[in-house]
């Protein structure tokens, strides 16, 4: 079987996760790298053996030899590049969030619908071992009807700066960067019910907190300690058409004792914790039981998760599988995220028609 030729658009830090995954997949040739910074693109191309380097994604997409692309650029470019890519006949793996607005999401969906290409949204946590194991229990009905979930992704100090803190490029702060992961994973495990309404709050109280000393955190390559136009923190109540609900809170900066990552599901027959460690809760013989699956990684393993995501995308490109992260999921997520921002801005609940 001939290898699929892949181009990676955007050579920032997240591209490493994609490139490492492609490099370990026997059905892939890393063919091209594109970045506005030519030197960075050349460095990545040399590291991963790509033979073509571009600074204009349109030129990359015009190369008929390229079968598929990963889009690892700023959020505000996801929609136009995705649309151009599927129109150019490429399969697409686009990093989360799929884009910035519902209107953009619908435009991407229409472009995919009128093509024969796969577009996969980068909801990488769906590919974790802990998620995949729990999904089998849920699909077998062991938790029953899941009617409530709660998720937290709290950084007490962790605004990455750079484009992450520029609302024009990112679309928002911790909600669209971190919240997208925890909301999506809970929503996916709940069976992806249609959103009915959202009520949300966002806060800009603390800023970058760049005065804090002796505490390291991830900084973007273009980190600027002074520039910040995104929220510090967001919380929301999301209601679904089937009556289920999800409560979420996320932050880049919060006066909290410690960082927190927590995702919990509650059903009629049982419950589960996905993070910080997988646990399944039930009852038997009139006794409550907490169960710990015996697996290699009870929490999300980034390397394995990204490898599973890349391998799944490659199989979709080869026609062996249908993506578990289709464009429609990207649209529904943008409805949720944008609804939270709108609710915060207006002080009102945002209700969606069926």
Image (tube, grey):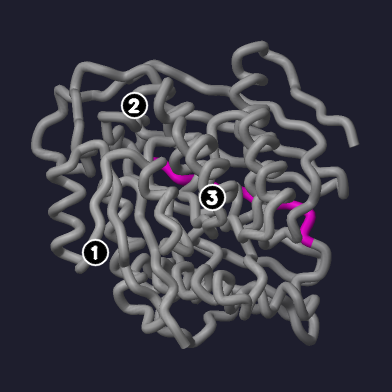
Element type at mark 2: helix
Query: As displayed, is residue 108 above or below residue 170?
Result: below
Examine the image and state in which quarter residue 32 appears.
bottom left
Quarter of the image containing the C terminus? top right
Q: Residue at x 16, y 46 (%)?
A: 40
Q: Label 1, secondary structure: give it.
A: loop
Q: Is residue 286 above or below residue 144?
A: below
The Cα atoms of the two marked residues, 1 and 3, are separated by 20 Å
Residue identified by numbered label 1: 50
Q: Where is residue 129 in the image (x, y as percent from the top left)?
A: 49, 76
Q: Give the range drawn in magenta.
A: 146-154
Q: Which residue is drawn at 44% across and 83% down?
A: 2
- Give the CA separation, mark 3 to mark 2: 32 Å
The residue closer to the viewer here, 261 or 24, is 24
Res. 306 image quadrant: bottom left
- Within 10 Å of disc 2 (Cα), the crowding (few <14, some 14-19, many 20+) is many
Which label belongs to residue 88?
3
């Amino acid at each position: 079987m001939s290898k699929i030729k892949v181009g990676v658009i955007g050579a920032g830090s997240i591209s490493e996760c994609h490139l490492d995954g492609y490099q370990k997949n026997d059905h892939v040739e890393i063919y091209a790298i594109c970045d506005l910074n030519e030197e960075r693109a050349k460095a990545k191309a040399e590291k991963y053996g790509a033979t073509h380097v571009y600074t204009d994604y349109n030129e990359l997409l015009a190369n008929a030899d390229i079968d598929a692309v990963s889009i690892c650029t700023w959020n505000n470019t996801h929609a136009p590049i995705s649309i151009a890519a599927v129109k150019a006949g490429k399969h697409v793996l686009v990093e989360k969030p799929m884009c910035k607005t519902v209107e953009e999401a619908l435009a991407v969906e229409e472009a995919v619908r009128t093509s024969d290409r796969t577009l996969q949204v980068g909801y990488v946590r769906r590919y974790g071992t802990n998620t995949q194991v729990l999904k089998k229990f849920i699909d077998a009905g062991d938790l029953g009807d899941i009617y409530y979930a709660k998720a937290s992704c709290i950084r007490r100090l962790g605004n990455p700066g750079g484009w992450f803190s520029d609302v024009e490029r990112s679309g928002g702060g911790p909600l669209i960067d971190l919240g997208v992961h925890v909301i999506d994973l809970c929503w996916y495990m709940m069976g992806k019910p249609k959103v009915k309404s959202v009520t949300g709050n966002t806060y800009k109280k603390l800023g970058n907190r760049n005065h804090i000393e002796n505490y390291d955190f991830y900084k973007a390559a273009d980190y600027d300690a002074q520039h910040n136009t995104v929220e510090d923190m967001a919380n929301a109540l999301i209601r679904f058409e089937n009556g289920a609900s999800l409560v979420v809170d996320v932050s880049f900066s919060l006066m909290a004792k410690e960082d927190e990552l927590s995702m919990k599901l509650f059903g009629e027959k049982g419950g589960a914790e996905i993070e910080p460690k997988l646990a399944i809760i039930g009852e038997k013989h009139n006794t409550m039981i907490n169960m710990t699956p015996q697996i290699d990684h009870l929490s999300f393993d980034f390397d394995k998760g990204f490898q599973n995501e890349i391998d799944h995308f490659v199989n979709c490109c080869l026609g062996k599988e249908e993506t578990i992260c289709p464009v429609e999921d990207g649209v529904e997520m943008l409805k949720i995220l944008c609804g939270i921002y709108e609710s915060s801005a207006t002080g009102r609940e945002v209700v969606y028609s069926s």
